[in-house]
């Protein structure tokens, strides 16, 4: 046995099928043939003209009632889908805003790190000026420190490039 939900799904699929068929060329042809036949029957003397009009009017009235119901069902379903899409768009916009905020925070952190590196470089330059008084081990430490600073600069540059790339992607998403 079918559950009530399955019955409703079946009826909705049937309504969708009928609605799409009514808007097709075969439906237009079938209706045209039906009307031609309906008016030919009295002309050929097979049925009385008044009876044909009564039957034709009744059939068309019932068809119009059912079609209006089916079309309204399709409109309601489309409206629900549009609402779902609008909710998804709002979620995406919120995500983009959060990503933008994260990128701004990362950019600020990178600027702070860059300032710290500049301070370290100034300290190293001062140390290099005073290097005449230092022994060989101190010189080796300074060389290693310079190397680390240089490596950090490269990593910061790579982070800046990645942030720029992410910002471009966010801008593209905003345009869409």
Image (cartoon, rainbow, N blue to C red):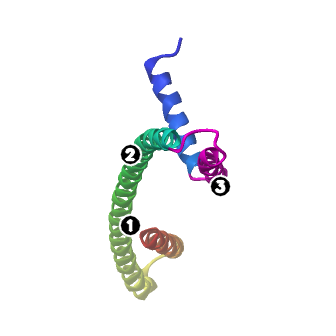
Mark 3, residue position:
25
The Cα–Cα distance between marks 2 and 3, rounded to whole angstroms, is 25 Å
Determine whether 149 is above or below 33 in the image.
below
Residue 115 falls in image quadrant: bottom left
Up-down relation of residue 86 to residue 128 (above or below)? above
Say which element carries label 3. helix
Q: Residue at x 51, y 75 (%)?
A: 161
Q: Position of residue 48 (x, y in %)?
A: 55, 40
Tell which of 122 and 103 is nearer to you: 103
x%, y% of residue 19? 53, 45
Q: Which residues are magenta?
A: 23-49
Say whether residue 141 is visible. no
Q: Residue at x 46, y 27 (%)?
A: 8
How packed mark 2 is, by other alpha carbons closer than 10 Å (few <14, some 14-19, many 20 or more), is few
- Foreground label between 2 and 3: 3
Q: Main secondary structure of the magenta part?
A: helix
Task: Name, please, the residue furthest toward the top.
Answer: 1
| Lower position in the chain sequence, tag 1 or tag 3 | 3
Q: Residues within 10 Å of mark 1 (few under 14, many from 20)?
A: some
Between tags 1 and 3, which lies in front?
Answer: 3
User: Does 152 appear above or below 5?
Assistant: below
Label 1 and label 2: CA atoms lie apart by 41 Å
Q: Which residue is mark 1?
A: 103
Judged from this view, the residue extending furthest toward the bottom is 129
What residue appears at the point 53 percent right and 74 percent down from the top-left corner? 154
Residue 2 among those drawn in magenta: no
State left or right for residue 105 relative to residue 5.
Answer: left
Label of residue 54 in the image: none
The residue closer to the viewer here, 27 or 143, is: 27
């Amino acid at each position: 046995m079918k559950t009530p939900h399955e019955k409703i799904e079946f009826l909705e699929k049937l309504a969708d099928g009928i609605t799409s068929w009514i808007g097709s060329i075969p439906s237009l042809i079938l209706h045209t043939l039906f009307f031609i036949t309906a008016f030919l029957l009295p002309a050929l003397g097979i049925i009385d003209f008044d009876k044909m009009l009564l039957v034709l009017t009744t059939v068309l009235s019932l068809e119009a009632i059912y079609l209006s119901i089916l079309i309204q069902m399709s409109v309601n379903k489309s409206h629900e889908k549009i609402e779902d899409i609008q909710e998804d768009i709002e979620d995406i916009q919120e995500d983009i805003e959060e990503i933008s905020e994260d990128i701004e925070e990362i950019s600020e952190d990178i600027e702070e790190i860059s300032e710290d590196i500049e301070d370290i470089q100034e300290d190293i330059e001062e140390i290099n000026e005073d290097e005449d008084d230092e022994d060989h081990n101190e010189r080796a430490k300074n060389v290693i420190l310079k190397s680390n600073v240089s490596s950090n600069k490269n990593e910061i540059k790579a982070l800046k490039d990645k942030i720029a790339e992410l910002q471009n992607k966010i801008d593209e998403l905003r345009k869409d």
